Amino acid sequence: MTNLDDTIAAISTPVGEGGIAVVRMSGNDSLTIADRCFKPAKGNILPSQAKSHTLHYGYIVREGEIVDEVMLAVLRKPHTYTREDMVEISCHGGFLPARLVLETLISCGARLAQPGEFTKRAFLSGRIDLTQAEAVIDVIHSRTELALKIAQEQLAGKLAEKMEELRVGLMDILAQIEAHIDFPEEDIEPDTVEKIVDKISAAINFIGKLLERAEEGYILRQGIKTAIIGKPNTGKSSLLNRLLGRDRAIVSPIPGTTRDTIEETANIRGIPIVFTDTAGLRQSSDIIEAEGINRTKKTIEIAELLLLVMDANQPMDEFDKENLELIKGKKAIIVKNKCDLQINLVLPDEIGCPIVNVSCVTGEGIERLKDTIYDVVFKGKHIIDTSGAIINLRHKEALIRAQEALKHTRESLNKGESLEFAAVDLRIAINAIGEITGKTATEDLLDIIFSQFCIGK
């Protein structure tokens, strides 16, 4: 349970050496606590006497000793991140200066913030809703510009606006149904029932469209796990380096160079693709290489996309045939590498997945491969845009419950059953939608969501 009477403090910048570290504090006693430990470099204006949104140069002092030279920002409610009085202290970067400043604030009356507690207070104060709070995480974790742009749209309240519009519309329908329940002597007209059913059907369709985009949201947030597989010396590591745009994996003409999986994330047409370069698939008596091959097989099992790299300069052999069997029924792309040389590889008809010719030496075909990856991930539809809301897995689960409840409501009305049945299901749908924005969220749900944040956010 969050105690809003406490004044909280935490380091908001990442751990490690840097030019500046930021320690933030929020709560009713923020300015009073700052008075106890901040000494202005010039003059005698204390934080509690300063105007809002002003910056002050001075020192954090503890027991008469200077802890660090700092810049202190005074931020008065309600125009702050949490809508509480806040103080943000910029001290020297590095683990020790920030920690000592934080310990000084705690010794003067603050307590260490819980994970996500600053953002949780912003939610509880009504400055943001739950979808916007979750968008803060998405902004922090964004790995491509497209993912960042969509997270920023969410942070601006795009999804919240749509959910509230949907919830209010359903509440209006519920009020209409309950009015007829309260006055049973007034029969509900057939055309009225028809209009209500039409509105519920529209809500069901609207939810359906949001659910269709759930996979997009997952891909943009989590990325696509993609395994680069194939025989030794087909150019798997060279392909990884080309797709990353830098030398990450060791490239060697000696078979078996890659003995462990190497994982890196690349931005492919706005999608974070988590590439795993694997050990070449073949029989090996080398214990270390054999372990690498076993790890390759495990990687293939969990991969969401496979890039099978084949040597276009060599005719097909038994290992190639085994690898083709390995990708059957999976989302895959065959990459025929070394297309700058004579092409001697002939593939069977009806492979069942796209084939792209590339040269990791010259770079030929790499851009075409990126386009193909995008098309395979999104089933050939270039549907990513930032004009609509994109939901996460929590939203998806709530919307599925809401949609099912609305279908039951529609079915009850169409069958002419008692209006109480329709009202019960309608309330279930309204509560499920309210969970998305936080209107009907439980304390347990809030704890789960905000526990995903870092301590200083």
Image (cartoon, helix red, strand yellow):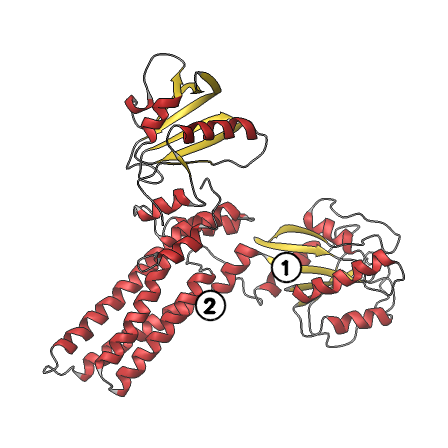
Frontmost residue, 48 versus 320: 48
Residue 3 position within the rendered picture, expressed as x and y whole percent measured from the top left: 33, 44
Which structural element holds mark 1?
strand
- Judge the density around disc 1: few (<14), some (14-19), many (≥20) Cα neighbours within 10 Å: many
Res. 212 mark: 2
Whether 149 is drawn above or below 13: the answer is below
Instruction: Say whether residue 205 is visible.
Output: no
Which kind of residue does numbered mark 1 sit on? Lys
Whether 432 is drawn above or below 75: the answer is below
Residue 16, image quadrant: top right
- Image point 35% across, 47% down: which residue? 2
Residue 420, image quadrant: bottom left
Question: Does residue 61 appear left or right of residue 322 in this picture?
Answer: left
Frontmost residue, 329 versus 128: 128
Question: Does residue 274 appear left or right of residue 403 in this picture?
Answer: right
Q: Which mark sits nearer the N-terminus, 2 or 1? A: 2
Instruction: Say whether residue 85 is visible.
Output: yes
Farthest bottom residue?
A: 415
Determine the CA span between mark 2 and mark 1. Answer: 21 Å
Res. 225 mark: 1
- Image point 44% across, 59% down: which residue? 390
